[in-house]
Amino acid sequence: MRLALKSLLLSAAVALLTAMLLAWPGVAPVHVTGTGAEKEPPVDPTPCLAAIAAGTDDRIIADCSALIDNDKTPRADRIKALTARGGAFRRQDQADRAIADYNALLALDPTLADIFNARGELYWKKGDRPKAVADFSAALKLDPNHPAAKDNYRRLALELERLGAMMALAGKPSFNCATARRPVEKSICANPDLADLDREIGAANAKLVRAAATGRSSATRDLQRQQDEFIAKRNASFGTPGYDLQKAMRERLDYLRSIQPQ
């Protein structure tokens, strides 16, 4: 009887204490288990490092992903794993996934010039030239003598310069539209596609003439004669039934491009 009474009193005391703790501001209940909460252990980096050493992309992606996805992976191991997996994605032409890994890498360590350069190359390949320029510039800021970044920056600058020149010439023929008098010339000036074709024909013919000028003079004369005949026929045929100016110009350009410089 006494034992039962003591047990009842103890239970009541525990219940009262629990209620008081729950009602006390800022005090959270404590959950106790018999064995203690188990924490997830960190992933062993050995498989990822072995895959990196073996250079097998599929293994790198599989084994290093487990390391990357584990919150308890040390920073140094995460950097190694992201670098390796980003390179594997890049070699497998998975540009967006490689860029995502490089983004994570640079968030961990923004001093990696090689990663800036590698990400810039991927952006360039995707056609995003502004981001590529920014990454090559960042790589060179970190390492002014970085050979790949220097070469990439130089080549991209030349490409942008050529694109700028092409944009400036877009829709402009090989002749001055302000002095155009013939109906065919006015038609070419009024149509950007025809104007581009005319300019490309003139440039292709001039390139062949320059190349031939270093060899036989008769080859140079033949090329110029053919060009003069094409223009004469174009001028005379324009406006006649069945004559397709754009088709004739396209055929002329294709022919000039098919000729190998002598």
Image (cartoon, helix red, strand yellow):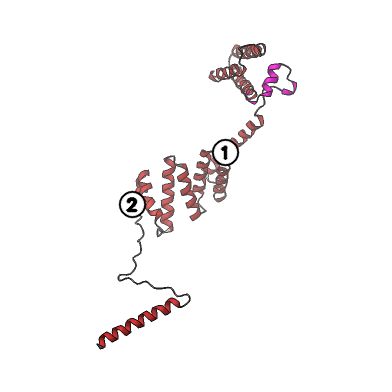
Tag 1 or tag 2, which sits nearer the N-term?
Answer: 2
What residue do we see at 35% from left, 64% from top?
39
Tell me: 87 left or right of 169.
Answer: left
Question: Image height check: is 41 above or below 255?
Answer: below
Tell me: 145 left or right of 12.
Answer: right
- Of residue 185 and residue 213, the one placed in the foreground of this image is 185
- Residue 105 placement (x, y as % from top left): 47, 52
* SS assignment at label 1: helix
- Residue 262 placement (x, y as % from top left): 55, 17
Q: How many marks?
A: 2
Q: Quadrant of residue 133?
A: top right
Question: Image height check: is 218 above or below 192?
Answer: above
Tell me: 94 left or right of 162.
Answer: left
Residue 56 visible, this orientation: no
Residue named by callout 2: 47
Question: Tag 1: residue type?
Answer: Leu
Question: Tag 2: residue type?
Answer: Pro
Residue 118 visible, this orientation: yes
* SS assignment at label 2: helix
Please state the extent of the stretch shown in magenta in the rendering: 173-193
- Residue 182 placement (x, y as % from top left): 72, 16
Tell me: 199 left or right of 113.
Answer: right
